[in-house]
Image (cartoon, grey):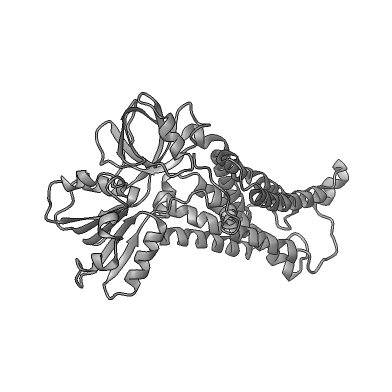
Amino acid sequence: MRDRKAIFLIVFSCLVTWLTWSTVQPTRALSIYQQYSHLLASISIVIFTWMFFIATRNRLIDRWFHGVDKAYVYHKYLTIVALALILIHEQTIKLGKIREVKTIKAEATRLLGIKVGDIGDGAGEFSLYLFFGLVLLAVIAAKLEYQKWKLLHKLILIPFILGIIHYYLKSRYLVFALDPFSLWMNFVILIGLLSAFYTVFFYECTAYKYRYKVSQLKEVANGALEITATAIDGEMKYQPGQFAFIKISGKENEFPSHPFSISSAPQPGQIQFTIKALGDHTTALQKILQPGDVIAISGPHGRFNYQAGAKRQVWVAGGIGITPFRSFCQAPIPADYQVDFFYAYANSTEGAYADDLKAMEQRKNLRLHLINSAEDGFLKIEDITRCLDDTPFDLYFCGPTPMRKCLEKGFAGTHYPLQTLHFEKFQFKGTGVFGFIERFFPRRRPTA
């Protein structure tokens, strides 16, 4: 598992929380239920911090999770786990109620005339209700335009802050002591708050630091637009197979930022994206983008790097999934690699770069197989396996999800030694609790 470093770090941070918690004593007598309830609440804060840290899309996330695309899968399930822990905390804290003793909070109540504990209780309850309220709103408002849908995710910052307030006012452990637990939790909360504020308020302003001017637009297939852009100031350094987020300067309301694979190998001062009009604003992009427009780019991201895989490989592209493989083919392939490249497309008008691939200089270590489905039928496992022997191989895939699942199922029924199936997960919107809910209450995405 290439993302084992991320798994280790997440589990390790939760273990540190448990170990440091076990070294301290509460400030008053607590039942066993309440003690572990506080531990679960602390772990939920750690998990929320991971969620916001992932959302920063920084280089560490790419490295630890083997691609920011895969990090968002963790983001989804971490959100669900955090919510479950909050619910358990809410229930277990009510078990075994005990008699109050005089504490610093009680003294603050006497001096200030404010029931600090009540403020903490209110923040905690409001945090829980608001979190569920946002989820419910996401379900009810399933037809919201994408930018408003995106705003719901940013509002998660509010219940997170309320949860932090609840922690500091209602914790039965010293929160500003110099013991390991207090120091660890304050560090985690600081990272969480910095990540959350950066994601919500500063990411859009600072992450898109590369500016390119569109120099050429070219239709390379039916509904597929090739964008060639030239660097204005500094150029982005990237590797073949990576992707980046782009948006059009001054046209944010018409085209929100989206991730796209870079469809060219690195060239001095130039970059190319090839975008298929598949809805969700990509159709609008093709209508509004003009030569001379400035695009802002954030990245690069991703670990879709064939040179990190086995020497024997199979590449499979479906439709517009040709883009990362085009960048692979434009750069030299090391002599010790042996690759069979299958490119499947619906018909001659849908095969982006099919003619370019045919005209490509023949290489001994790269065999090209073009599958025009209208003429040859759909790509079948047998088409691939007839090129294989007993040599272990890696498969690199980019294309529609049903096609990938069909390949997975097909190879599972063969004896061929497929080691690893490499692919990227561009489902950034279907993440977190909202993404989990959307599986059961799918929203209608705009087609333009």
Specify whether 194 is left or right of 242.
right
Q: Position of residue 281 (x, y in %)?
A: 48, 39
- Looking at the image, which residue sits at the far top? 292
Position of 351 relative to 234 (above/below):
below
Residue 176 visible to an observer of this rendering: no
Residue 96 position, x and y percent, is 80, 69
- Image location of residue 238, percent across then percent down: 31, 41
| Residue sitting at x 45%, y 58% | 6
- Front residue of this view, candidates 307 and 34: 307
Q: Is residue 369 above or below residue 154?
A: below
At a point 40% along the width and 27% down the height, the residue shown is: 294
Q: Is residue 56 above or below residue 255?
A: below
Which of the image's four quarters has the N terminus? bottom left
Say whether residue 2 is left or right of residue 377.
right
- Residue 302 rendering spot, x and y as whole percentages: 37, 49
The structure residue drawn at horizontal position 15% and vertical position 45%, both measured from the top left corner, is 359
Q: How many marks?
A: 0
Residue at the spot 20% in from the left edge and 73% down from the top edge = 390
Q: Nearer the viewer, residue 202 or 263?
A: 263
For the view shown, which residue lies furthest in the front direction? Answer: 375
Q: Foreground residue, 383 or 156?
A: 383
For this view, does 184 lie left or right of residue 125? left
Question: Picture quarter containing residue 409?
Answer: bottom left
Examine the rendering and report whether any part of residue 377 can be seen: yes
Res 207 → quadrant: top left
